[in-house]
Image (cartoon, rainbow, N blue to C red):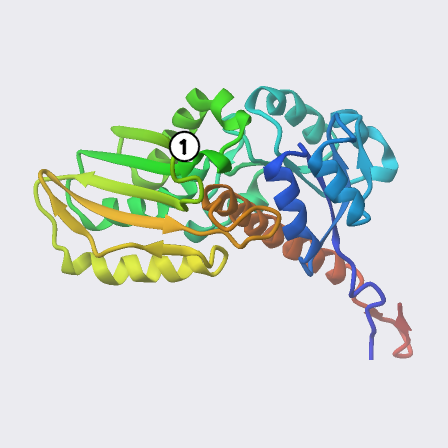
Amino acid sequence: MFKNNQQNDKVRVGIIGTGKIGADLLAKVQRSPFMECVLFAGRNLDSAGMIYAAKLGVKISDKGINAFLDQSNRCDIVFDATSAAYHKEHAKLFEELGILAIDMTPSQIGECCVPALGMQEAVQHRNISMISCGGQSSIPVAHILAKYIPDVKKISVSSVVSANSIGPGTLANIDEYYRNTKAGLNKYTGVNDFDVELHVDDVNLETRMFTSVTAWCDAADLDALHGPLNEMLMRIQRYVPGYRLESSPLVIDGGIRVDLSVEGLGDYLPKYAGNLDIINCAAIAVAEHYAKCLLDERHAQQVPTIKTGLQMEY
């Protein structure tokens, strides 16, 4: 019987950006059966993320984007956890190198992707936008509300996160955060009018992420929402186990509201940092989907061929 000598191969992954997002992505990649991190790149070898990666035995570099020019650091996938401005520069190089870029920043370069709503983007595009933490938490619910409520006039999304779980990168890119979240909402709902808010709780520093999604409409059949919302919940929990619907859909003045929360896995980050965990879990789901497709393709090319005399070529 034909034996695939490379059945334990993994897709080569790099991470650029060594802050909270990057370090937590590394923790998640480390346990993936489909990926191995071959490079963790940033600018400061003394950063907490770099020290963490070194302890795990992962190759580190302070050469930033230039580290990916070294052929020994060849990657199939790179997670970019830097900033929107930097990713606009990095994306050009990743495209030239034939690397799938998974954009953790709100640069709006890549194709928006929410795993619960399909991952065809991962095999159809070379740059995938993970939108934002608020986008990953709200868009699946907004999609259901827009689909099952007639004539939704507007969708509002309001998220509350702990001050301890939001980094300077998010605050520096707050305008891009709002724009990218709205772009993702538009793609998956077809609605054109949105309000997006992000609130930082600097009192309850261990509060998990809370998000409210409101569909403004004249009327809605609440019973018609329960089944689709629960089905969507199960889809999301396959890759974000700590995702919860806090209540049934609520009728408010002029609309329908759904409240949800996100608790993290507690890998590199504390469990209350659900806002960071959900975007990372979504990114891992996309990367693993692409990795499995890539590995299947490579293994298919290794299938033996039948020759005259029934000899097998390996």
Is residue 285 positioned above or below 184 on the image?
below
Q: Residue at x 55, y 24 (%)?
A: 84
Observer able to see residue 126:
no
Q: Residue at x 67, y 57 (%)?
A: 32
Q: Nearer the viewer, residue 105 or 23?
A: 23
Which residue in the protein does label 1 denote? 202
Residue located 21% across and 56% down the image: 248
Q: Is residue 47 left or right of residue 210?
A: right
Q: Position of residue 197 (x, y in %)?
A: 32, 30
Q: Secondary structure at mark 1?
A: loop
Residue type at mark 1? Asp
Q: Is residue 83 left or right of residue 44?
A: left
Residue 103 on image: x %, y % = 57, 34
Residue in the image at 27% along x and 48% along y: 259
Q: Is residue 56 left or right of residue 175?
A: right
Structural crowding at the residue carrying mark 1, measured as other residues with C-alpha within 10 Å and reported as few (<14), some (14–19) or many (≥20): few
